[in-house]
Image: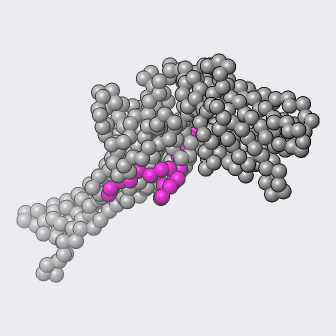
Amino acid sequence: MTISSSLNAGVSGLTANASRLASISDNIANSSTAGYKRVQTDFHSMVMGSSGGTYSAGGVRTTNVRLIDERGPLVSTNNATDLAVRGRGMLPVTSMTEVEVGASNPQMMLTTTASFRTNADGLLATESGLVLMGWPAQSDGTIPPYARDTSDGLEPVRFNVNKLSGEPTTEMSLGVNLPATATESGAAGTSENLSIEYYDNLGKSESLQIEFVPTVPATGESNEWTMIITDTATGATPIGEYTLTFDDNRTSGGALNAVTLGSAGGAYDPATGSIIVNVAGGPMEINIGMIGDDNGLTQLSDTFAPASISKDGAPVGNFTGVEIDEAGFVRANYDTGVSRVVYQVPLVDLPNPNGMIAMDRQTYMPSSESGSYFLWNAGEGPTGDILGYAREESATDVAGELTNMIQTQRAYSSNAKVIQTVDEMLQETTNIKR
């Protein structure tokens, strides 16, 4: 019985070390595979106990675990959509096969790094057939709320690379100084004119023509102007007319004191400092500043100065490329210099990453052992951030694996020697009978 248990223990030792050699071989073979997570083989003794003063060898068994939570070093690249996760969290991807068959809810897989490029169909995919997934943005670039404990809201990141893109102007802010001397008695009453380009719904260039007409009193100073707004798309008929009055006291001199609606346009909103006028393509909000504020229209000194004019909208442009920032926002870039948010890539976190199911191409799937996953905005909660122009190298330490291989070889030889010795002892037992 004891000799037989020794033989079984030796066989289990051979099997265990063969398993460890397999994991070492896999680690070394993937020492140059970006994002590879090494496999660790652990040995566990099996105790059979003793009976009647004799000891029965139990042998050894092994367990293998892929250390997904270990990260390899990050290296820089020249591709903006080479992605790596710096810190905790994983990128959601799916298989190209599922996308091509039109799966309504493709299976989410996870990876820590990949080299994505736009393919012929505009998908952001790898050469191995992984497609990046993200939450689609609304037309204004904002990301609507999505459920964070499910992948149902995620979609394959796709671009129409042959599509021209433009954006109409719907908002505008004016930071303009009007000369205080123009509203004094005896002034010439010369109007100040300002032309501001905007883009209509078809991407065409139009202009708002804004005329500031000073009110010249018989005596003293009026601190009053009439602002007349016309649209080149609709002709000479004013789309907005307002009377502007400015303060002249010590605390808020030069700031707006009152805005009165004239014969055209929408009412002034003192809470936002905005007026709304209707251009040819629809309403446009123009911020002229709040009452008592000096960040919009002002009246100071003797100089007309359009100091700060900002607006949204963009001319029609051609798609030129993609970039992904640290927060996971995917931006489409156009040759007009415009950059538009089209997706947000979340980072997926799990309580036990090492409990996930390992798949091909350095991807993993959540399981009951990994725990429930949660989709975080990159950089929030426990997650790190997303790096473009970067890849994660293999987590394999070749020197360490070669050392382990030598140890495994010696252990395997020792167990083989045990089997050989047991065989010799059994032979001796057989010879006793002769």
- The N terminus lies in quadrant: bottom left
Residue at image location 69% in from the left, 43% down from the top = 259
- The C terminus lies in quadrant: bottom left
Residue at image location 32% in from the left, 56% down from the top = 372
Residue at image location 78% in from the left, 28% down from the top = 193
Residue 384 in magenta?
Answer: yes
Is 387 on the left or on the right of 416, as rendered? right
Q: Residue furthest left?
A: 433
Is residue 368 shown above or below 219? below
**Colour setup of the view:** one colour
Residue 348 in magenta?
Answer: no
Is residue 327 shown above or below 330? below
Q: Nearer the viewer, residue 188 or 117?
A: 188
Is residue 16 shown above or below 218? below
Q: Residue furthest bottom?
A: 53
Q: Nearer the viewer, residue 93 or 306?
A: 306
Residue 177 on image: x %, y %: 80, 40
Residue at image location 31% in from the left, 40% down from the top = 107
Examine the rendering and report whether any part of residue 342 can be seen.
yes
Is 226 on the left or on the right of 302, as rendered? left
Image-quadrant location for residue 197:
top right
Is 194 on the left or on the right of 89, as rendered? right
Residue 178 on image: x %, y %: 81, 38
Magenta stretch bounds: 370-393
